[in-house]
Amino acid sequence: MTRILVVGPHPDDQELGMGGTIIKLAQQGHDILLLDVTNGEPTPLGSVETRKQEAADALEILRRDATGTIERWLLDLPNRFVEHTIPNRHAIAGVIRAWQAEMIFTTYATDAHPDHRAVTRCVEDARFDAKLSKIDMPAPVDAWTGEQKTLGPTIYPKWLMYYYATHLRWVADPSFVFDISGAVEQKLESIRAYHTQFVLPEKNRKALNWIEASATYFGSRIGTDAGEPFFTNEPIGLHALNGLVM
């Protein structure tokens, strides 16, 4: 099975952009690490403590019926001040090596949120940095728990995919769509776990409606009940047609 790293600039980005895919991949036995680059604070109704609990609650919902593992670590860079720097690149490269990630998902590069753009650039470079044998990378500490992680050997993840959690008002034009039929309600439940972000603020409750509508729309593009869109800069190879939704 594949070791997968899903990077989110803030807690909830992974659930918003590809929560259904995380659920399905974990049910298929893959091991997944959700990396929160920041703790998401400050926000109008949240706090560090509430965001930590919300992220933990969302994780438990995603884990339901999983046969693979799902973990969640916090890098703890400053929210709204994330920059594309060499230390930040190397911090993410250390996570890649500690998790021994074979596949990475991160936010789509075109976005209105500066944190999202910076994180995407950092992840792209960290993928390269993680294979460097003569540059020391920092062993990551999970800031949610304070646990020091062990740095693994150099690795170059074969795949880098982009999910859409963009703040721009536009419709994605994806490279492929992942079938998430049967996982939509669980995905929405994981988003509702972020109570201070999507339940208490009245204006943000509408997000659940368009997320559900998006799943229906992208599912219709591949002939399934629901789907999530992704982009890749590299071609996807196929051994056979039986993996395609027909």
Image: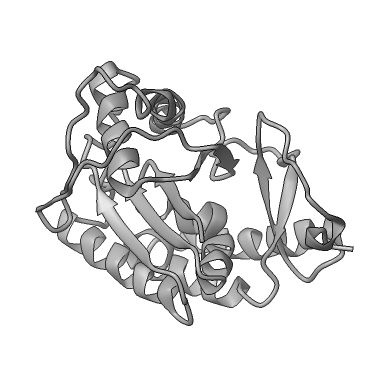
In-front residue for pair 133/107: 133
User: x, y percentage for residue 43?
Assistant: 28, 48
Which residue ends up furthest to the bottom in the rendered image?
A: 65
Q: Is residue 176 above or below residue 144?
A: above
Q: Residue at x 48, y 82 (%)?
A: 65
Q: Residue at x 40, y 31 (%)?
A: 119
- How many labels were placed on the picture? 0
What colour-coding does the image apply? Answer: one colour
Q: Is residue 11 above or below residue 169?
A: below
Where the C terminus falls, by quadrant? Answer: bottom right
* Occupied quadrant, residue 159: top right
Q: Is residue 118 above or below residue 54?
A: above
Q: Answer with left or right where residue 57 lies relative to residue 141.
A: right
Q: Is residue 244 above or below residue 35?
A: below
Q: Residue at x 72, y 41 (%)?
A: 171
Q: Residue at x 58, y 68 (%)?
A: 24
